[in-house]
């Protein structure tokens, strides 16, 4: 024993990373107005996505769009949700879209229904990217619904 005290043992942070560094760097780089611009832009792109979903006969929005998240699902024309088959179909759509890598979305459950979940966060996301997402989901949903016969 002996020797100088080990000062790291006296701090509550120990080996915890500097989690605030990411936010600090973002604010230092973009500034308050720049960050505000990104938030407004991402919310506008999410609103565009919601409008595209609402305009598509085979897509159904499942929640209001208040920030940059849009929850929706693929619904084949003239089909209801017979025994949760839409949940299974939309999980398959999400998995296929992720595996193909052209666009990306995740899933969630809203009011007991599986939903495709798109969240606009990347600074490089464009209107073309949003339109591509809708196109890929519709194409993938149509292919999988046809293959399943559901």
Image (spheres, rainbow, N blue to C red):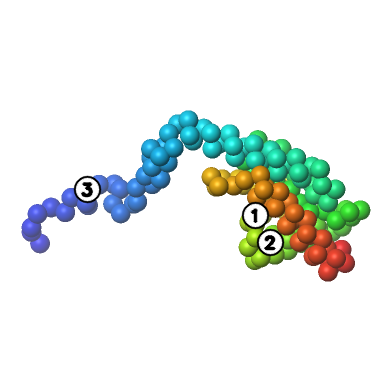
Within-10-Å neighbours for mark 1: few <14, some 14–19, many 20+? some
Assess whether mark 1 and mark 2 are in contact (beta carbons under 8 angstroms): yes
Q: CA distance from mark 1 to mark 3?
A: 44 Å
Of label 2 and label 1, which has the lower sequence position? 2
* Relative depth, front residue between 82 and 18: 18
Mark number, residue 97: 2
Do we see residue 125 in this rendering? yes
Which is in the foreground here, disc 1 or disc 3? 1
Picture disc at residue 105:
1
Q: Are marks 3 and 2 in contact (CB under 8 Å)?
A: no
Can you identify the residue that label 3 sits on?
A: 10
Taking the spot 60% from the left edge, 40% from the top edge, the residue there is 42
Residue furthest to the top in view is: 33
Disc 2, SS:
helix
Hey, which residue is sitting farthest bottom in the picture? 147
Residue at image position (65%, 57%) is 103
Residue 109 shows in this picture? no
Position of 134 with respect to 36 (left or right) is right
Q: Residues within 10 Å of mark 2 (few under 14, many from 20)?
A: many
Vertical comparison of 55 with 101: above or below: above
| CA gap, disc 2 and disc 1 | 8 Å
Of residues 18 and 98, the one drawn nearer to the viewer in this rendering: 98
Pointer 3 or 2: first along the chain? 3
């Amino acid at each position: 024993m002996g020797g100088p005290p080990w000062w790291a043992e006296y701090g509550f942070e120990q080996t915890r990373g500097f989690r605030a560094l990411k936010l600090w760097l973002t604010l230092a780089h973009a500034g308050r107005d720049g960050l505000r611009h990104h938030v407004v832009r991402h919310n506008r792109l999410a609103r565009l996505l919601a409008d595209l979903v609402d305009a598509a006969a085979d897509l159904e929005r499942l929640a209001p769009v208040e920030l940059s998240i849009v929850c929706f699902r693929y619904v084949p024309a003239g089909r209801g949700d017979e025994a949760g088959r839409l949940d299974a179909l939309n999980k398959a759509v999400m998995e296929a879209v992720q595996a193909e890598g052209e666009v990306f979305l995740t899933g969630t459950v809203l009011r007991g229904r599986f939903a495709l979940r798109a969240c606009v966060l990347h600074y490089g996301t464009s209107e073309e990217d949003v339109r591509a997402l809708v196109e890929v989901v519709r194409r993938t949903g149509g292919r999988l619904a046809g293959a399943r016969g559901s």
